[in-house]
Amino acid sequence: MAEERKHALLPASSSKRWINCTPSARLSETFPETTSDYAKEGTLAHDICELKLRKLFIEPGMPERTFKSAHNKLKKHVLYDPEMERYTDEYVDYIRRIAYSYPVSPKIVLEKEVHYGHVARDGYGFSDCIILSGTDCHVVDFKYGKGITVSAEENPQMMLYAIGAIAEYGIAYPVEQVILHIVQPRTKNFSRWELPAGKLQEWAEQTVKPAAELAWEGKGAFKQGPWCDDCFCPAAGTCRARMEENMEALQKHLDPVTGKLMDEALLSNEEIGAILPLLELAAPWIKKVQKAALDKLLKEEKIPGWKLVEGRSNRNLPEPDKAYEALVAAGYKKAMFYEKKPIALTEAEKVITKDDYNTILAPFVVKPKGSPALAPEKDKRPAYQKDTTPQEDFGGENQYKEETVC
């Protein structure tokens, strides 16, 4: 089971950040370590995964009583949710399929502390699962979160885990091919990427080593990118370099008189295309600055020109049955306050087994085509295909007829 883990300056989990923004490693040390319920929830889900895999592969003779005792202990956690069983089972099934694809049982290592200090000083991390067979090395990472979809392709965290695995097991298993996997069942994201071991070592020498040396010394240039938010940089909302970069970029598109972004009608398509990536970077930054200000005010620090106020809240009925019974007693009909309707699909998934979902419920599930959304051209998703003509989008033959509101 997961224990409290020591802190590393160059951990694999934030490698995407310190490789691209080298001085952020030392800067992050000036912030106190924090955690969240989301992180604790993820740790609990990882513990359940480890227990199930340990019984399946590491300790196949584990008595059922021992397993149930450990399982029940985890289920008593305040953040436990029964849906964790289905999602962790999906992860276990994924590992099982990899393991059973080999004619001889592979070596499986769980929650392994791997070291890559030969490319990043004192570097280490904890890999969820490493599978070794012949010349293949699989590194599998379980992601319980659903806020950020994670890809295995060119994933530096996973690549550093593989570097550490090869360093420790390379003599017994002469790895030639590395296969990285991300299992993120709550978002239906199962990502897989392969690369030759030689390419991995080349990346470690040419990319990681020089970046790690700068990061260790606190040198290099601050650089804004997706890693500011994907890797939960503690300075994301107060980083001066990020502010200067965003403000400089936005100033180019501000009206010199009003100080606001120029009217879209005055921009060419080329200008709009140039502004969009700036806004993509600025939008999460603005939220982080606002959160940083809120946190400081909650600590009773002063932010000139700003104060805390009570935000919006929604009315609710803590005891609806009692409230409506009072109305019924006053002469209203009970049917006016109660309705019978099916529960949502996500709620139904929580109370049925994975097999019943696949065999009984899945045939009834319909996933409509998603609405068009903006994405950079380098996005790997296929381009949106319209099913209608522009005329049909605006009502076709009836586009100018008055609609009847029911």
Image (cartoon, helix red, strand yellow):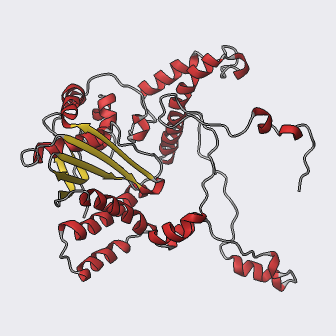
**Residue 308 appears in which quarter of the rendering?**
top right
Taking the spot 38% from the left edge, 47% from the top edge, the residue there is: 191
Q: Position of residue 27 (x, y in %)?
A: 31, 33
User: Which residue is depicted at the point 68% across and 59% down?
Assistant: 314
Camera-nearest residue between 140 and 251: 140
Name above or below for residue 93 compared with residue 173.
below
Q: Nearer the viewer, residue 90 or 328?
A: 90
Q: Quadrant of residue 228?
A: top left
Residue with the most extreme left position: 171
In the rendered image, which quarter contains the N terminus? Answer: bottom left
Residue 60: x %, y % from top left: 19, 72
Question: Farthest residue toward the bottom?
Answer: 329
Of 355 and 144, nearer the camera is 355
Task: Tell me the residue at 40%/56% (across/down).
Answer: 144
Using the rendered image of the protein, determine whether residue 39 is visible from the camera's viewpoint.
Answer: yes
Q: Position of residue 154 (x, y in %)?
A: 33, 36
Q: Is residue 82 in view? A: no
Quarter of the image with the C terminus is bottom right
Q: Position of residue 339 (x, y in %)?
A: 75, 74
Residue lying farthest to the front in this orientation: 103
> In the rendered image of this protein, does residue 1 appear above or below residue 98?
below
